[in-house]
Amino acid sequence: MEAPTMNKAVERELLVPEAPDEVWHSLTEPAWLGEDASIELEPAGEVRAGERSGFVEEADEPRRLVFWWSAPDEETSRVELDLDKVEGGTRVRVTESRPLELLTLRARDLAVELDVAGGTGPVAYAGGAAPVMG
Amino acid sequence: MPAADPADAVFSALADGTRRDLFALLGQHGEASATELARELPVSRQAVQKHLGLLAGAGLVAARRAGREVLYHPTPGPMSEALEWMAEVGRQWDDRLAALDRQLARGRTSA
């Protein structure tokens, strides 16, 4: 799995001695997400935390939770929570990214790339798929 | 068109996975020495030094001397906004995961 160029993603991990079931259950008491937080652990469920709000994209109990959220005047970001059963407990891995922004960045990169290429042929850079013709 | 397009340098500097990691790490730290950065990456200090040199050549990082150390920091530009976001979001998740851990820990003692 290759990380796309300039993907603005943040990853954090937490290791706890509880089993994934128990961790999943704890996610339903959403104080950990922030003040006045609430989260409905089902697709299209509502997510609220402070001034942030959003919706659940995927809820695969007790393994994976994906939601989108944003604060007012902020771009929307996507949060993936993966609960992996490991020896002695659960690894909670969280990834927050801004895929929508990645699209605009990528468009800008391609524009630069095509400009730089001029008449000399395609310029490759790692992770960036060159536009494929036909 | 200028002889050397700065975009070439930026793209080739960020074309390498280790340099991307290094750049992101530097964003999280704000400022760090090659030795500190090497501790968090699976490469030697010498390799980190070389990668930092390439990032500096592309104008993505700058260095300053602090006593007997050279400290690197990301330079302002289109990427710095991204790095600030990453640092801020990283801090927020550190807090939330710590809160989740405390929440689970309450069950550990009372159960």
Image: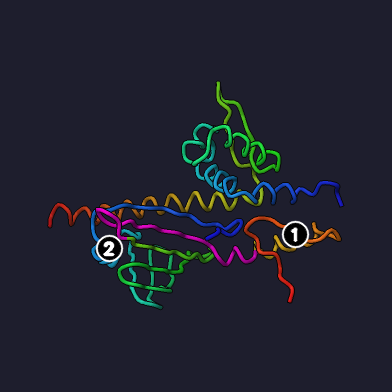
Question: Residue A115 location, x and y as percent?
Answer: 80, 60
Which residue: 47% across, 60% down? Answer: A96
Question: Residue B95 location, x and y as percent?
Answer: 36, 51
Q: Does dot 2 land on a helix, a strand or a loop?
A: helix
| Residue that mark 2 sits on | A20
Residue range corresponding to the magenta coloring: A85-104
Packing grade of label 2 (10 A; few <14, some 14-19, many >=20) is many
Packing grade of label 1 (10 A; few <14, some 14-19, many >=20) is some
Closer to the camera, A36 or A122?
A122
Question: Which kind of residue does numbered mark 2 sit on?
Answer: Pro
Question: Residue A63 location, x and y as percent?
Answer: 33, 67
Which residue: 30% across, 68% down? Answer: A62
Q: Which chain contains the residue that carries disc 2?
A: A
Res A89 → quadrant = bottom left
Question: Which kind of residue does numbered mark 1 sit on?
Answer: Glu
Of labels 2 and 1, earlier in sequence is 2
Instruction: Please give the label number shown on residue A113.
Output: 1
Question: Residue A111 location, x and y as percent?
Answer: 75, 63
| Residue A3 relative to residue A110: left or right | left
Q: Which chain contains the residue that carries disc 1?
A: A
Residue B110 is inside the magenta segment? no
Which residue: 58% across, 53% down? Answer: B82
